[in-house]
Amino acid sequence: MTRVSGIIQLLIALSGVGLFGLIYPGVMAIVATGVALVYVAVAFGALRGSRVAGWAAFVFSLATAVLATAAVLRFIGNGFSYQSGNFELHDGVYWPPYAFLAIAMGASLAVGLQLLAARKRHDKLQS
């Protein structure tokens, strides 16, 4: 379970690096990409078995899940329809909300798997 969550964390972190460069302008893209690169580093460390990197990756995944979910809710609040693929009265498909939805779902899955693995380790220590 921890290996799977580590792979998911690494994929989410790598997608963040590419996505932030496409969505955010100028300095904001540089800062967001820098944070995403730190997330890539700790996710890779967690995948290699480092306990400190594992906890850091968990915190990054939790923050990513919360912020990406907030972005999805903001898109919905601003009138984005996931069924039509765009805002009301607009044509074409606007893809960033789908990217944030995928990131929110992946990060939430990674957090859930990490919590299940921690619970399993805790139960194993108790017995």
Image (spheres, rainbow, N blue to C red):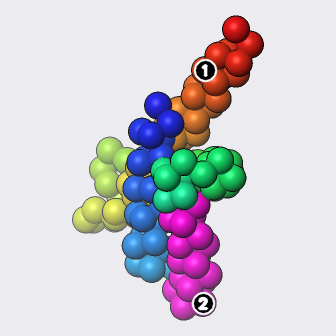
Which residue is the site of mark 1?
120
Visible residue check, residue 73: no
Task: Name the residue nearer the viewer: 55 or 127.
Answer: 127
Q: Is residue 20 above or below residue 14?
A: below
Magenta span: chief secondary structure: helix
Q: Furthest residue to the left?
A: 92
Q: Amino acid at mark 2?
A: Val
Classify 12 as above or below 8: below
Of 84 and 120, nearer the camera is 120
Can you name the residue that lies furthest to the top here?
127
Q: Report the residue at 71% width, 18% height from top.
A: 125
Tell me if mark 1 has few (under 14), some (14-19) or many (20+) residues whose alpha carbon lies within 10 angstroms of its own.
few
Task: Kindly report which numbered mark, 2 or 1, lies closer to the viewer in this rendering.
Answer: 1
Instruction: Name the residue located 44 percent from the left edge and 40 percent from the top edge.
Output: 3
Which badge, 2 or 1, is on the more N-terminal residue?
2
Q: Which residue has dot 2 on it?
A: 27
Say above or below: 47 vs 93. Answer: above
Q: Is residue 51 visible?
A: yes
Give the residues drawn in magenta, as a range: 25-43
Helix, strand or loop at mark 2:
helix
